[in-house]
Amino acid sequence: MINTMLNRMIVYNAGDPMRIQHSVKVFAFAQNIARNEQCSENLVFTLSMAAILHDIGIRNAEEKYHSSAGNYQEREGPPVAEKLMEDLTMEKSVKDRILYLIGNHHTYTNINGIDYQILIEADFLVNIFEDRLHKESIDSIKKNIFRTTAGITLLDTLYYNGGS
């Protein structure tokens, strides 16, 4: 099912390799963090699906609001994701959690689960690189956002040459 969703996300974003590669990288980091944090396979599944689809609302946000701002992504993502998942067999609670994560992945307060925390950390790991953030910004993100041991280790390895 994860591979099916990965393929659907790629087709949905056809012609936009940057967006496709962003989602694939967030998916890979999210899985890596979750497995290093020894999360359950059910959580890894939910997180993987959310990571693949986390930015699926950007295209609609840009069309409707002429902006890819996080609040618009959160608003537009769940309906698109729901349509992409409609024929997949999974528990309603799992589907609802995936949609919740997509609809909140730019909201950094009231994080209510390790899946949510990991999705945010994985997205930041990729955004730091893609947005070419400076050390001061990375320091602030590390202090204010990162909470998992595995996420902090990746952040340190990628952006601090392995040191904290």
Image (cartoon, grey):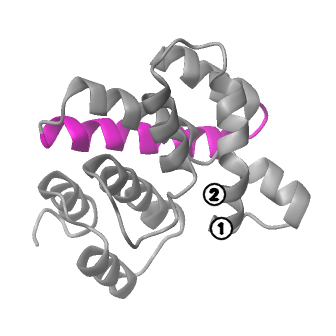
Q: Is residue 13 left or right of residue 43?
A: right
Up-down relation of residue 142 to residue 56 (above or below): below
Relative image position of residue 63 (x, y in whole percent): 89, 55
* Marks 1 & 2, CB-CB < 8 Å contact: yes
Position of the C terminus by quadrant: bottom left
Relative image position of residue 27 (x, y in whole percent): 42, 38
Residue that mark 2 sits on:
74
Which residue shows up at 57% across the image and 22% down it?
Answer: 5
Which residue shows up at 64% across the image and 29% down it?
Answer: 9
* Quarter of the view holding residue 14: top right
Measure the C-alpha gap from mark 1 to mark 2: 5 Å
22 drawn magenta: yes
Q: Is residue 103 left or right of residue 76?
A: left
Query: Which residues, given as a range, are shown in magenta?
Result: 14-37
User: Quick one: SS at disc 2?
Assistant: helix
User: Quick one: SS at disc 1?
Assistant: helix
Residue that mark 1 sits on:
71
- Residue at the limit of the structure toward the bottom, as seen here: 136
Question: What's the amino acid at mark 2?
Answer: Glu
Which residue shows up at 45% across the image and 76% down it?
Answer: 133
